[in-house]
Image (cartoon, rainbow, N blue to C red):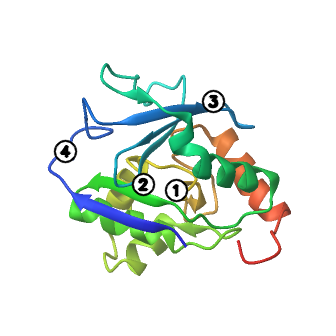
């Protein structure tokens, strides 16, 4: 189960709330590309695919610290190997109250399952807000762990994934084919 600290902020206009100091980072290789991981003293605050327009650049004042990410990297490796279905990672996510409700809703979508934007909107108590759910989903700062790739169009189509629909399909196929055993 993912432990979360999701805090309110007024940075709703940005792709990612801007922090200029106090973050630690590392770059981790994965089957879908190099991942940029960010953390604060409270937990993981970002997981981005490097090289995309919506990925943050490493900022002055950030500290590279591979050791601080050893556990999350091990869990990601297990996920990509098909032996982990959920994460046990402290999160420190900043977002509006609505974004937080969407991200908490994403955490409730089971491994290997999908849900439409409309179904997610209804489940979080905002029926009809499927477009706003899509926008909040797109601002998720911790992809994979907060599984925004599990949200699909009402007709089952792979819509709106910032890392590209080919990576979304790859992640969904990974989860469909490799149902982990055990309690992870």
Evaluate if marks 4 and 3 touch, with contact meaning CB atoms under 8 Å apart.
no
Give the labeled residue for mark 1: 148
The circle drawn on residue 11 is: 4
Q: Which mark is residue 34?
A: 3
Name which of mark 1 and mark 4 comes first in the sequence: 4
Query: In the rendered structure, are the residues bearing label 1 and label 4 in contact, judged by CB atoms less than 8 Å apart?
Result: no
**Mark nearer the viewer, 2 or 3:** 3
Q: Is there any visible trace of residue 118 in the rendered image? A: no
Q: CA distance from mark 1 to mark 3?
A: 18 Å
- Image height of 3 relative to 134, above or below: below
Q: Is residue 182 above or below residue 54?
A: below
- Asked which secondary structure carries label 4, the reply is loop
Residue at left 58%, top 52%?
A: 144
Mark toward the start of the polypeptide (2 vs 1): 2
Q: CA distance from mark 1 to mark 4?
A: 20 Å
For image coordinates 32% across by 58% down, the residue present is 132
Circle 3 SS class: loop
Quarter-of-image position of residue 33: top right
**In the drawing, does residue 67 fall left or right of residue 24?**
right
Residue density around tag 1, few if under 14, some if 14–19, many if 20 or more, within 10 Å: many
The reply to whether discs 2 and 1 touch (Cβ–Cβ < 8 Å) is yes
Find residue 137 and name its label. 2
Image point (51%, 74%), residue name: 108
């Amino acid at each position: 189960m993912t432990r979360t600290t999701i805090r309110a902020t007024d940075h709703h206009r940005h792709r990612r709330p801007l922090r200029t100091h106090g973050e630690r980072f590392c770059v981790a290789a994965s089957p879908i590309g190099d991942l940029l991981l960010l953390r604060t003293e409270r937990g993981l605050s970002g997981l981005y695919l490097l090289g995309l327009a919506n990925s943050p650049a490493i900022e002055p004042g950030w500290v590279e610290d591979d050791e601080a990410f050893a556990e999350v990297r091990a869990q990601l490796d297990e996920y990509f190997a098909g032996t982990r279905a959920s994460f046990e990672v402290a999160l420190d996510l900043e977002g509006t109250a609505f974004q937080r409700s969407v991200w908490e809703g994403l955490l409730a979508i089971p491994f290997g399952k999908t849900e439409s934007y409309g179904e997610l909107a209804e489940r979080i108590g905002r029926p009809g807000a499927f477009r706003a759910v899509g926008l909040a989903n797109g601002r998720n700062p911790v992809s994979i762990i907060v599984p925004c790739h599990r949200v699909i169009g009402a007709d089952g189509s792979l819509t709106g994934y910032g890392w590209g629909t080919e990576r979304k399909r790859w992640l969904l196929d990974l989860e469909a084919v490799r149902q982990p055993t055990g309690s992870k």
